[in-house]
Each structure stands twice: as structure tokens, then as C-alpha cells.
Image (cartoon, helix red, strand yellow):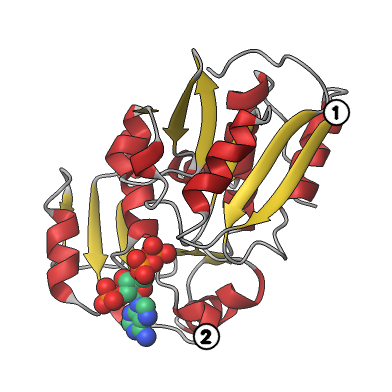
Amino acid sequence: MAEPLKSQPCQLALFGQPVKHSQSPKIHQGFAAQFGLAIDYQLIESSAESLHDKVKGFFAEGGHGANITVPHKQNIMPILDGLTDRAAQAGAVNTLFKRNDQLWGDNTDGDGLVMDLRSKNINLDNAQVLIIGAGGATQGIIPSFLKAGVAEITIQNRSQEKAQQLAALFPRCQSEDHLEGAYDLVIHATSMGHHGLCPELQSHWFGDQTIAYDLSYGQAAEPFLEAARSLNARTVHDGLGMLYGQAALAFEIWTGHSPNIDLS
Ligand code: ATR
């Protein structure tokens, strides 16, 4: 839990590059309205060189909490006083909060994704999960899938060595595509959608019960979701619900209030 809210409006911010088109201010204003709280959620464009000073300055001037986004989820770690277990396991931080005058990092991405999948009635218990991509986004969600009780996670990546290294960090994770049938859940976690591209997909990964999910949302999710549809995935989802889920969990850390999510 973060320190209690001292004054309103509560000062919040997102640090990243680019942050101009972020939906986070709108999402958090909507959450705050549910509880009659006044918040000021700023977007702070930060280069790798300026990030540390900007974050320290924000909290020195009364900042209550912050989100960290691409490309700084790992860059931020050296200036933090503490990490929650889930941030340590994810190897990345997306949420900052103050505890006993110290600056802590948490990671709500993976639990936000699991929250969204559960809200869509997607069963993770004993599921066979395939994740395409082996970067920070993948590492961020693996601990939450393991906690949610999936049977096994298979990681596929352009660089097979990176997939092997990542799989070796976690139990029930491997990088060999050894499944006879289709996967229950196929997650796209590379950055290719932002360039209008989709990784090569194998048709045997998909069956009529397979759920396809892209961690990106909007246009960036379309190439993968379209390819998954053509391979007859049962349903396809972009990552908008994950965006709201991770935000709701961050909001709860900062304010103690658990907001309702309405994606309509
Ligand atoms: P993030 O931290 O957002 O996950 P990242 O660490 O840069 O971003 O990882 C991006 C992922 O997308 C990696 O798995 C990368 O594959 P490599 O490990 O082989 O580099 C994958 N990726 C990016 N562009 C790709 C492309 N054109 N084709 C295949 N994979 C790609």
C-alpha cells in the first residue's frame, strides 16, 4: 500500500516516450470520478537521460504516484528504494508509489492482463499458453500466468536463444513447441504490430477453442488478430482491457479504491 492521500488534487503522472497519445489520463480521471476524488494526471515525456531527474523532481514536488511506460520500465529501476515481489519477478516496473518516504516500484501489467482475461470468462486454470515474443512485455506477464495456475507456457521468438534464456528463469516455461494439439491461449507480445506487421504463425497453434490476445490495442493489434481470425481462433482480443486492468490496479495502490472497469 502507498502512503495515504494527503491533499487533493492527487498528483499523478506517466513517464515514457512517447506519451502524447496515452489514454491513461482519461482512464484515471474516470476511476477518480467513481470515488469523488480530484486527481491531476500529467503526461511527462522523458528521454533515457532525463528520466531519473524528472521522476525525482516530480516526487520532490508532491507527486503521489506514477506510471512508467515504454521504453523505461527497466531504466527506472536503479533509482528505486524498493521493489514489490511481482516487480522483481517481472524484472520491470510500471507503477511507482511512496512508502515510508521511500520510492517503490510495482508491476501491475501481468495481473492487469489476468484480470481482463477473467472478466472475459477465459479460463486459465491448467491452460496451455503460447507467448510469441521474448522481450520485457513477455517477462512482465509470465509471473501472473504462473500464479493464475496455467499448466505450461511456451515461448516462441525470432531469436530462439532469447526465448530459451527467458524460459530458464521460470518454472513451467519452455521454448520448444512440443504440443500435439492447439494451445488454449496464444498471446502476441512482440512490438511488430506497431509497424503493421505480424510474426509468422503456425496453423497448428490454433484450434476452434483457441483464444488469441494481442498485448497492444487498436491498430497495432490488428495484424495479429486478423491472422489469428484467418486461422479460426475462437475469439480474438486486443489489449485494451489489459490497459484498463493495469491502470485499475495502480489506482488501487495509490488511493486504496478499487475501480469498476467499463470497456464499452
Ligand atoms: P518489449 O520490452 O516491449 O517486450 P523488446 O524487449 O524490444 O520490447 O522485445 C520486442 C520483442 O519483439 C522481441 O521478442 C523481439 O524479438 P527478438 O528477441 O528476436 O529481437 C520481437 N520482435 C521485434 N521486431 C521483430 C520482428 N521484425 N520480427 C520478429 N520479432 C520481432
Residue 98, position in %: x, y? 53, 23
Crowd band around label 1 with a 10 angstrom C-alpha radius: few (<14), some (14–19), many (20+): some
Label 2 CB sits under 8 Å from any ligand 1 atom: yes
In depth, the one of 46 and 179 nearer the eye is 46
The amino acid type found where label 2 is placed reads His
Task: Examine the image and state in which quarter residue 154 appears.
Answer: bottom left
Estimate the spatial distance between the alpha carbons at disc 1 and disc 2, rounded to whole Å: 37 Å
| Viewer-nearest of discs 1 and 2 | 1
| Label at residue 195 | 2
Label 1 CB sits under 8 Å from any ligand 1 atom: no
Q: In this view, does 198 lie above or below 191?
A: below
User: Residue, x 39% and y 58% (percent of image)?
Assistant: 137
In depth, the one of 100 and 259 nearer the eye is 100
Look at mark 1 in the image and give the residue it sits on: 38
The amino acid type found where label 1 is placed reads Ala
Q: Is mark 1 on a helix, strand or loop?
A: loop
Tell me which numbered mark, 1 or 2, is placed earlier along the sequence: 1
User: Residue, x 39% and y 38% (percent of image)?
Assistant: 79
User: Residue, x 65% and y 18% (percent of image)?
Assistant: 256
In depth, the one of 178 and 181 nearer the eye is 178
User: Residue, x 43% and y 43% (percent of image)?
Assistant: 93
In depth, the one of 80 and 246 nearer the eye is 80
| Label at residue 247 | none
